[in-house]
Amino acid sequence: MQILRTTEQATELVWRWRCRDASVGLVPTMGALHEGHLSLARTSVGRCDHTVTTIFVNPTQFAPHEDLSRYPRTLDADLEGLRREGVSAVFVPESDEIYPPGFSTSVQPPSVAQSLEGEFRPTHFQGVATVVLKLFHILPTTHAFFGQKDYQQLCVIRAMVRDLNVPIEIVACPTVRETDGLAMSSRNRYLNAEERIRALRLFAALDAAEQAVRDGQRDAAEIERIMQATLSADGPEQGVDSIDYAKLVDSQTLQPIPLIHDRAVALIAAKVGSTRLIDNRLIDP
């Protein structure tokens, strides 16, 4: 497994593979890898001739008050896990390799970025879209693999690729969960034992939304009320500490819907202790 430090090394290697008509998969990460990340790498290795993973904690997607400085960095363990999965190369750039002195260009994210996370983290998707487009240029792979756990991010990247005619296939992979249902996240390691139990309210709220639809409920506002009640039931001693949103929206546009007629997506962002968690589920009527 090759370790790449510069953009020149990364681009040269991928083009060498592409000139041999090889398919190349890209798995962008910020490190602190868990089974969710490794499952993306495993899927890419199984589908493509070569796989390159990136490990870069992108500063432009963090607001000043967010957790950039405490975001976990576990590079040695990350590299060992990727080596076991059969990844061909890992791109591990320093920040100034991605954002050189004088850098002042950014990507205006598509309209699907405006709601939900866009309301609570207004600069987040600009940072995501910018770094992902840069990685697509630095590493001109044939495929890129993203998890559905970050559902709105997946929608943003798909729209950006479509709108800007980026010649890459975006592959969505299912959310990977712990045995009790908690969506795997690098931020889960911030939770203490008591918070870890309360974090299961997100999974329970998604279950409640899906069950309501199975029972015939079609009113989106009522389904959202059920999710919110499940998240906060019994107060912060047993539920989440705060809810940013618990919404049922159109699965493509992420726009509000009054009634569920077609596939929708339930999305939640909530804080447990000081840790902000997100989760989602696609729901069919």
Image: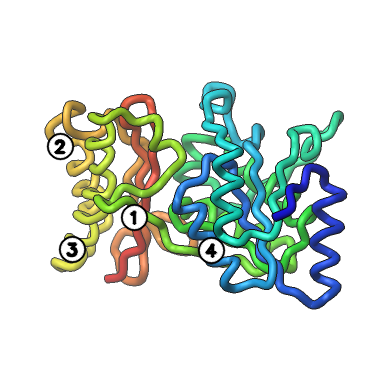
User: Spatial distance from mark 4 to mark 2, Cα to Cα?
Assistant: 38 Å
Residue 94 in which image quadrant = top right
The residue located at (35%, 53%) in the rendering is 177
Q: Which amino acid type is marked by label 1?
A: Ala
Dot placed on the residue nearer the N-terminal end, 4 or 2:
4
Q: Mark 1 sits on what residue? A: 266
Q: Point out the tag, 3 or 2, that comes first from the N-terminus.
A: 3
- Circle 4 sits in a helix, a strand or a loop, which is it? helix
Left or right placement of residue 103 versus residue 174 in this view: right
Asked whether disc 4 touches disc 3, contact meaning CB atoms under 8 Å apart, the reply is no
Tell me the crowding category of disc 4: few under 14, some 14 to 19, or many 20 or more residues within 10 angstroms, Cα based: some
Q: Cβ–Cβ below 8 Å for labels 4 and 1? A: no
**What residue is shown with label 2?**
233
Residues under labels 4 and 1: Cα distance? Answer: 27 Å
Q: Which residue is mark 3?
A: 217
Label 3 close to label 2 by CB (< 8 Å): no
Query: In front of the other: label 4 or label 3?
Result: 4
Question: Tag 4: residue type?
Answer: Arg
- At which x and y percent is residue 83? 60, 54
- Name the residue tied to disc 4: 42
